[in-house]
Amino acid sequence: MRLLLTGFGPFGDIVCNPAQLVVEALAADVTLWEPDGPHRLISVILPVEFGAADEHIRNLIEAHRPDVILMLGVAAKRDSIGLERIALNLDDAPDRPDNAGCAPDGIPIAAEGPLALAATLPLPALRASLNAAGFPAVISNHAGTYLCNHVFYTALWTVERLGLPTRCGFIHVPLPRDLQPAGADARVALADLVAAIRHCIGYLSECPT
């Protein structure tokens, strides 16, 4: 399986992004990737900038044509892993500029694209597998209107335009207790998030659809 795995760097109040830490931990996991691991990995930390992230994800898909695209982002107020169902063709963050100062106000991501696109991962089965393994996971109906949604939609639209059989999805991870103030009531640690996404990779490598 050729996997494109992405996360984001710091932004706003998130000075240490768990999505980045999870991607980096999995990229360093020699049992997965090298020298004789079962998968080929392309791992990238995307900039928290609408224009640059859009260009990066399109170029990566066009260059590598992965079998699976798994994109990660942080949802700091959630306490479960969120498997995103729908990407909206909308950037709407007038009060939340990206790291380049861009604050779109209700702008379509792709003028010629549909209003929404659905993840192409087996979400109910993946949620059930995560829960059975002890990881708190839910299906979320959409990924917001910030950078996470932007790259999710861009990836799905690029795959569709290119006619690729690539399975594509976005996962929001909660802010783990390791990255919160002492005494914070968080359900998961960073190590749990790494193990959960590793579980997702294993499941998707064995699940044909």
Image (cartoon, grey):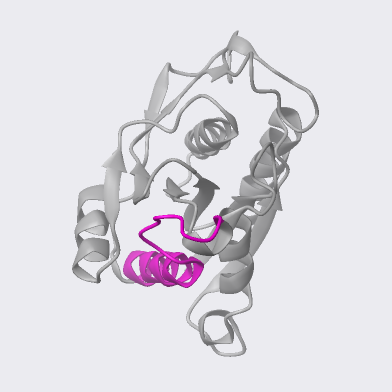
Relative placement, left or right, of 105 versus 143 is right
The spot of residue 202 in percent (x, y) is 37, 72
Residue visible at 48% across and 39% down in the picture:
163
Q: Is residue 64 magenta?
A: no
Residue visible at 64% across and 45% down in the picture:
14
- Quadrant location of residue 26? bottom right
Quadrant in which the C terminus is drawn: bottom left
Relative placement, left or right, of 83 versus 104 is left
Residue visible at 53% across and 61% down in the picture:
182
Q: Extreme top residue here?
A: 106
Relative placement, left or right, of 73 versus 137 is right
In the rendered view, tell whether residue 39 sits above or below residue 178.
Answer: below
- Quadrant location of residue 185? bottom left
Residue 122 visible in the current orientation: no
Residue 28 visible in the current orientation: yes
Q: Extreme front residue here?
A: 183
In the rendered view, tell whether residue 31 sits above or below residue 23.
Answer: below
The chief SS type of the magenta part is helix
- Quadrant location of residue 47? top right
Q: Is residue 187 magenta?
A: yes
Q: How many marks?
A: 0
- Quick one: 15 or 84, which is closer to the camera? 15
Relative placement, left or right, of 161 versus 42 is left
The spot of residue 134 in percent (x, y) is 25, 69
In the rendered view, tell whether residue 156 sits above or below residue 23.
Answer: above
The spot of residue 46 in percent (x, y) is 69, 47
Residue visible at 43% across and 33% down in the picture:
143
Query: From which residue to which does the magenta span run?
Result: 180-205
